[in-house]
Image: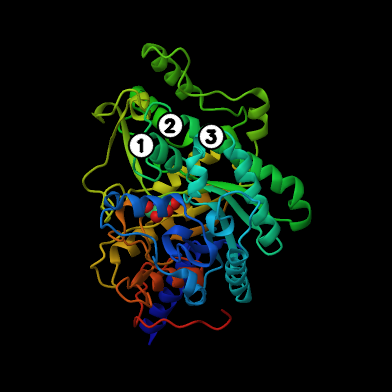
Amino acid sequence: MKLLFVLSLVAVACHAANAEERRSFPADFLFGCATAAYQVEGAWDEDGKGENIWDHMTHNRPTTIKDLSTGDIAADSYHNYKRDVEIMRELGLDAYRFSLSWSRILPTGFANEVNPKGIEYYNNFIDEMLKYGITPMITLYHWDLPQKLQELGGFVNPLIANWFEDYARVAYENFGDRVKHWITFNEPREICYEGYGGDRKAPMVNSTAVGTYLCAKNLVLSHANAYHAYNNDFKPTQGGQCGITISVNWFGPLTDSEEDQFAAEIRRQGEWGLYAEPIFSAEGGFPKEFTERVAAKSAEQGFPRSRLPTFTDEERAWVRGASDFFGVNHYTTFLVSATEHLDVAPVPSVIDDEGVGVYRPPEWPVSQSSWLVRAPNSIYNALTDLQKRYNNPAFYITENGWSIAPERDLIDDDRVAYYRAALESVLDSLDAGVNLKGYMAWSLLDNFEWLEGYTERFGLYNVDFEDPARTRTARKSAYVYKHIIKNRYIDHEYEPETLTMTIDEGH
Ligand code: NOJ
């Protein structure tokens, strides 16, 4: 009897200790999922939508896509948006981040002709989310430029800043009464470096010397135009916020040597500093050491001026501080060396300008995507660096996720492990005082993974792409994410009893 009493006292004490140790996410922390128009919507030419650069590329150069697929139908969210909201409710999401298809709203890209059916689709979708208390977060541009604008140069034509502002205004006017979270661009690095400097994204311009840099300047100016338009003409009545999402993977030094530390810094500046520094730094403009390096290389290579353009004082001031929050897409970590693992790169090119090598230890688990590995403290390292560098602005993690092979079943334990580790790293960041407001998992459901087609699956929900109905089925990771959202802490022991999804009361 006495022993029993003592044992139960011990049990109570342990329980209290666990509760004390258990770290919770703040009650107002926004948990959500993210997608992008071209990756999920389909209906590529329905109801007046114009052609965009991904329609154009997948139709005219089909072999650029690994499995020769297209986003013509994708997850068919255009017709399944109610089911999509239903799965958001199953998960108990607070928020949903999605993008608008520019050419669905403005078929030619220009704002003289607005497609009413496009507006209607997004109105219905937004209203359906709001009906169930889900906060819509809109990305204006997630890589699907109207083809007509590409024919005029796209992001290397400085007039893009006007065209983008005009489009943004149409979106604010039509949806801003209900939408309070605006993201101008998704991942400028991937738009500029992969689309203009290289050939890993449409429009595959592959201008290695200057493409990335011309695009970078025009893109941050486009962002600033859209930000100021919102700030001056819509925020006073609509009261929302407008920011940008940049891909910030972590680049740490391979060793503690000064050379490797500097190499890692150069890589950070070349990868994400090019886009973050002009907006979030106190001085504005492109990152200092990287600017010096490109100027020196350009001179050596016989260019009469640096391949990296500069900002006028007026432009610099216009861009600096032009964001209400910093959206971070974070997936992985690279270790950077000054002398080892050097890439073979064309000369001149961004990679050659950086002139560093990257490495990942073989023990870090690899996903279905070769670039995506699970590294320790990845989110913490990235966010605490940004926190110090840019004076702790408001942050959202706007994407984070893990891919698996299409043939896998619904038991995605490697994804569960990735999300649990990532969210522990989020808690570490909150403990360190990072002003982080929310976290969006990539992705709500399987979708078209750009040049990889449907060969890499990122969804918490599986999509059956063989089935005309594009049936959505929750994977194990969906149950685990739902449990975390509901309880606001990470239970590493939790296992769903059955894989049967229901909508909890109140959702
Ligand atoms: C970032 C991009 O924004 C998204 O479109 C892509 O599918 C994911 N990364 C996964 O690669």
User: Mark 1 CB in 8 Å range of ligand 1?
Assistant: no
Q: Which quarter shows the N terminus?
A: bottom left
In the rendered structure, the answer to whether residue 322 lies left or right of residue 31 reads right
Distance (Cα) linking label 3 and label 1 = 17 Å
Q: Residue at x 57, y 70 (%)?
A: 125
Identify which amino acid the numbered label 2 is placed on: Gly
Which badge, 1 or 2, comes first in the chain's sequence? 1
Q: Kindly identify the amino acid type of the residue bearing the numbered disc 3.
A: Asn
Task: Kindly report which numbered mark, 2 or 3, lies closer to the viewer in this rendering.
Answer: 3
- Residue at coordinates 40% horizontally, 78% vertically from top-left? 6
Vertical side of 474 occupied by 74: above or below: above
Spot occupied by residue 11 in the image (x, y as percentages of width and height): 41, 75
Q: Crowding near pointer 3: few (<14 within 10 Å), some, many (20+)?
A: some
Total marks shown come to 3
Residue placed under numbered mark 2 in the picture: 211
- Which residue sits furthest left? 362
- Mark 1 and mark 3 in contact (Cβ < 8 Å)? no
Tag 3 secondary structure: loop
Residue at image mark 1: 198
Q: Which mark is residue 48?
A: none
Q: Which amino acid type corresponds to the residue marked 1 in the rendered image?
A: Gly
Callout in the foreground (3, 1): 3
User: Disc 2, disc 3: CB below 8 Å?
Assistant: no
In this picture, residue 244 sits left or right of residue 317: left
Examine the rendered structure and indicate whether residue 247 appears above or below residue 445: above
Circle 2 SS class: helix
Q: How far across and how far down the image is residue 225, in percent?
A: 65, 40
Tag 1: Cα neighbours inside 10 Å, few (<14), some, or many (≥20)? many
The image quadrant of residue 400 is: bottom left
Residue bearing mark 3 = 157
> Where the C terminus falls, by quadrant?
bottom right
